[in-house]
Structure formats: structure tokens, C-alpha cells
Image: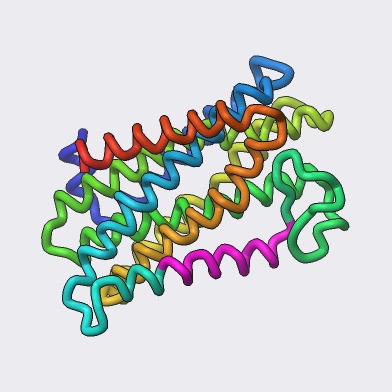
Amino acid sequence: MIDTFMGFDPWLQALTATLFTWITTGLGAAVVFFTKEVNDKFLDTMLGFAGGVMIAASFWSLLAPAIEHSQDHFIGEWFPPAVGFLLGGLFIYAFDQLIPHAHRNAPEDRMEGWRAKKKRRSTLLVFSLTLHNIPEGLAIGIAFGAVSANGDGAAIAAGAATLALGIGLQNIPEGMAVSMPLRGEGMSRTKSFFLGWMSAVVEPIAAVIGVLAISIMSPTLPYALALAAGAMIFVVVEEVIPSTQENGHSDLAAMSLMLGFTLMMILDVALG
């Protein structure tokens, strides 16, 4: 099965990987069928874990390869990763200002994005995770796109698969973080699940876009890898970590973040 996957074209590898991450989002969202509400302590712990996975993936799966692919740059190997990383943050910041959304635990007067106050809170919660999933899909697509842009395809594909595995794991609590608040607002279990799951449908789309972009513009690979890393770090700092600090479980969330970081580091070093 692994050999079959490694034999796919990069765009099909990325699509398959992000279909996996989309399914894991659905697994998290499906919790709504089994319980009326998820304990805030549990959800803060899981989201802390997700943040740790994203931070570790940003470095070992994206920034480190970006630095490696920049060794011959005429300014210095630091230049493409630095530029790409900052552009990634600006990229998500622009979306953050444009797309109406609401973060978990945010009060009504802190809705963000264009005309956010005119949208229902349930809609804003779905848009929030949708925004969150764009850089994750791009990261996976760019990582698999690097396979066709570099001669050492097997090693890079293994690293990209590890990235997809890590993102799939952290998508489980993200699915919960959408479906459970929707259920708490009185939405039916089925609709809460459906919207929580569909919030991650952008990941396969963004992944294919990332692969195609790299295949067309392979010289931009280190910039693109670092851009995906910057986008994910922006999401972690702006949304994931703050959402775990509002319910009195900050220490537990921090320790869970360190656990997620460590697990992703082990996976990436051991498997990638």
C-alpha cells in the first residue's frame, strides 16, 4: 500500500493525503453524535496538542527543507526562508482581515473580517476553521510538490507523508472545536457534524493548488516551503494558542502543546 502511494504522481499524493486529513476532521466532528458537549478542559488540551504539532511541522517539515534548498542562493541561505516565512504570515493576515470569522471563546464584539458583525456566529465559527485549514492544505501540497522539483523523491515524499500524518492527527480536535460549539448553539447534531467536517474541505483544494504552483515554478520551492510554515505559525499564534487560554487550563494546554511538538518532531526525524 505504501509502495502504491509512493508511485502516485505528486498531485495525487497530495490529494490522497489531504483526503486523509479531511476524514480525520470528520472523525473529530463526529464526537457531536456521542455527547452533548465536550469538556473545555479536554478541548483546550487537545487544541494545545494541535498547536504543538503545527509548530513542529512548520520547522522540521517546511522551514528546515527550505533552508536546505537555499544553500546556493547568491544572497545567503537564510534569505528565501526568511522572505517566504514573513510572506506566509502576511498571506494569512490578509485572509484574516477579509474573511468574516469568529475564534472560539471570542465575545460578540471581537468578530473579525469584512462585515463579520452581520453574520451568524455559527457561520463565523465555520469560516474560522476554514481559514485555519488553508495553510495546512497548502503546506501538504507544497511538500509533495517538492517531490517533482527535487531528484531525491522518495525521501521528500516520506517527509511530506509525515507532515500529512501530523496534520491529520491535529485535525481531530479541530473538528471538535467547530461541531461542538455549533451544537451548543442549538444546531442539530447532523448539521453540526456536517459543517464541522466541511470546514476542512478546503485542504484538498489548497493542496492541489500548492502542488501545481511548485511544479510550474520550481525555483520558488524554498520560498513556498517557508511561506507555508509562516502561514501555519501565524494561525497557531493568532488563533490556536489564545483559544486555549480563556478557561483556566493554560498550564495543561501548554504541556499538551509540548507533547504535540515532541511527537511531531519524533515522527519527522524518525520517518522523514
Would you say the magenta stretch is mainly helix, strand or loop? Answer: helix
- Whether residue 11 appears in this view of the structure is no
Q: Is residue 175 visible?
A: yes
- Compared across the picture, whether 180 is left or right of 1 comes to right
Q: Residue at x 82, y 44 (%)?
A: 107
Identify the residue at horizontal 74%, vertical 49% (top origin).
102
What residue sits 30% from the left and 49% below the top? 60
Farthest left residue in view: 151
Relative to 72, is 102 on the left or the right?
right
Q: What is the x, y in percent for residue 257?
A: 48, 35
Q: Which residue is the extreme one toward the front? A: 251
- Of the 4 image quadrants, the one containing the N terminus is top left
Q: Which residues are magenta?
A: 85-100
Q: Residue furthest top?
A: 34
In magenta segment, residue 64: no
Image-quadrant location for residue 125: top right
Left or right: where does residue 218 sit relative to residue 41?
Answer: left
